[in-house]
Image (cartoon, helix red, strand yellow):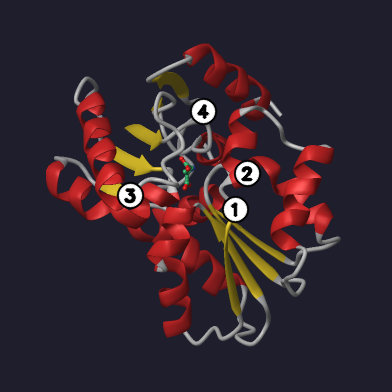
Amino acid sequence: MKIGVFDSGAGGLSVVKSLLDHKLFDEIIYYGDTARVPYGPKDANTVIRYSLEALEFFNNFDIDLLITACNTVSAYAITEMQSKASYPVVGVIEPGIKALVNGFTDKDAPILIIGTRATIASKRYQHALEQLGYQNLTALQTGLFVSMVEEGIFDGPLLYETMHHYFKEIETPQAIILGCTHFPLISESIKSYFDDIPTLIHSGEAIVEYLEERHGIKENVEETKLSIYASDNVEGLRAIANRWLND
Ligand code: DGL
C-alpha cells in the first residue's frame, strides 16, 4: 500500500516512525505544511482550508489511504477531508482515545491531556473520555512545545523551564495523552519531568493499533520507501527526520 501522511510540520514524523517500526506500508509520502506551521493557534476555518489544500497536494500521488498525523487537523477537518477524498482518511484522535481506554482502566486517576490551543479548545478528547466515565481530567494547551520541536529542541533547560511553566500547578498525572504529534519527540523529557509516568499515549503507536483493529492492516513489508515533502524549508524538515527516524 502507498499512503500519505500529513501534518502541519515535523510532528507527524513521530507517527511515521511508528509506521516504519511496524513495517505496515510499502510507500509513505509525507507532507509537512512547514510554510504555515503552527496550525494550533489558528481558527477552525483556517485549519479546514489548509487541510483541504493538503488534499490537493496528495492528488499528485496515487495514494490508497491518508493519515492526518496531526491532532489539530483531526479535531477540525477530518469530516471535510473524508467527504472530499476518494480514499480513506484516518485521523489520530479516535485511535488515541481507544489506546487509552485499552491500557488504562482507573477512571478516577488523574489524566493529563496536552495539545495545541485548537485541539484542547475543541474538547474532542475531554468529551469522549468524560462520556466513558473518566472523571479526573486536566487539559492543557501547551503550544510552545510545537515551536520547540520545530526548532529541534528535544531536551535541555529551555524545554525544562517551559514544562515547568505549564505543569507547575497540576497534580502528578498517572496517564498523559500526548494530544499533539509533535510531543512524542519530547516524550523522554516529559517523562523525566514527572519522574515516572505509567501510561503515555502517543498518536503513532495508537494509530498502528487502530489500523490493525479497524482496517486489518498489519506488519507485512520488508522495507518502506519514505519520501518527504514540505511547503517550505524541506531541508530543515529532512534534518529533523534524519535525527528522529534514525534513532
Ligand atoms: N502536530 C500537530 C498536532 O498534532 C499540530 C501542531 C501545530 O501545528 O500547532 O496537533
Mark 3 or mark 4: name the one nearer the start of the chain: 3
Residue on which disc 1 sits: 142
Assign the C terminus to one quadrant of the image: top right
Mark number displayed over residue 222: 4
C-alpha separation, residue under disc 2 versus residue under disc 1: 6 Å
Three-letter code, disc 1: Thr
Three-letter code, disc 2: Phe
Q: Are marks 3 and 4 in contact (CB under 8 Å)?
A: no
Three-letter code, disc 4: Glu
Residue on which disc 3 sits: 43
The percent position of residue 73, horizontal first and vertical second, equals 35, 47
**Residue shown at the point (77%, 71%) measured from the top left:** 172
Residue on which disc 2 sits: 145
**Residue shown at the point (58%, 30%) measured from the top left:** 150
Q: The residue tagged with tag 4: helix, strand or loop?
A: loop
C-alpha separation, residue under disc 3 versus residue under disc 4: 41 Å
| Total numbered labels | 4
Mark 2 or mark 4: name the one nearer the start of the chain: 2
Taking depth in this image into account, of 222 and 227 the one nearest to the observer is 227
Seen in the image, is 243 located left or right of residue 228? Answer: right
Taking depth in this image into account, of 61 and 239 the one nearest to the observer is 239
C-alpha separation, residue under disc 3 versus residue under disc 2: 19 Å
Q: The residue tagged with tag 1: helix, strand or loop?
A: loop
